[in-house]
Image: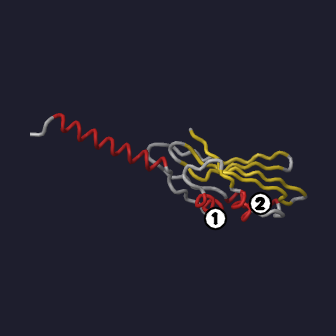
Amino acid sequence: MVSKGRVIGVLFGLFALVCLFATYDFSRGRTADTDSPLVGEVLAATKARECGRDATEIVARYLPLGMDQSEAEKVLAQTVIRPPTPWFWKPVNENSTVWNGDSLEALRTIKTTAFGNQLLRLYLSFGDGKLRKLAAEVVCRFD
């Protein structure tokens, strides 16, 4: 006959393993499903918990200075992910674009986890319909 304490111990151990798996799995984030080579390259260059990383050099390969404004907007429109469908949390896919005169600030979700998101923040300045200035960084939001 199995003792009551042993059964409780085994059940507690199984519960701890399930919790450990769920926490580990969703803290590192699911692989983002995307067709954007820009997002793929930024994710490849960014470590899992790296926030505030300058990504201007990577983004400049896809949005070179002198690029037409309409072409830059097309590249930004393609910079999206299809978030995972986890069973115990709802991913927040935050994508926004704010114009201020000839300047554009865009936020694109590049990775989503149970504890927060990694976003690609882009600052673009245009002059005469061409891209004149570019800055990009990876930022983290913890919810």
- For the residue pair 124 and 9, the one nearer the viewer reads as 9
Residue type at tag 1: Pro
- Screen quadrant of the C terminus: top right
Q: State left or right for residue 110 relative to residue 106.
A: left
Q: State left or right for residue 135 relative to residue 8.
A: right
Q: Which of marks 1 and 2 is nearer the N terminus?
A: 1
In the figure, 54 relative to 1: above or below? below
Give the labeled residue for mark 1. 37
Classify mark 2: residues with Cα within 10 Å, few (<14), some (14-19) or many (20+). some
Classify mark 1: residues with Cα within 10 Å, few (<14), some (14-19) or many (20+). few
Q: Looking at the image, which residue is at 66% across and 57% down?
A: 79
Q: Quadrant of the rendered structure where residue 57 is?
A: bottom right
Q: Looking at the image, which residue is at 13% across and 36% down?
A: 3
Residue type at tag 2: Ala
In the figure, 86 relative to 68: above or below? above
Q: Residue 108 in the image: state x and y as whole percent.
A: 66, 51
Q: Looking at the image, which residue is at 85% across and 55% down?
A: 126
Give the labeled residue for mark 2. 72
- For the residue pair 131 and 73, the one nearer the viewer reads as 131
* Element assignment for label 2: helix
Q: What coloring was used for the rendering? A: secondary structure
Q: Quadrant of the rendered structure where residue 47 is?
A: bottom right
* Element assignment for label 1: helix
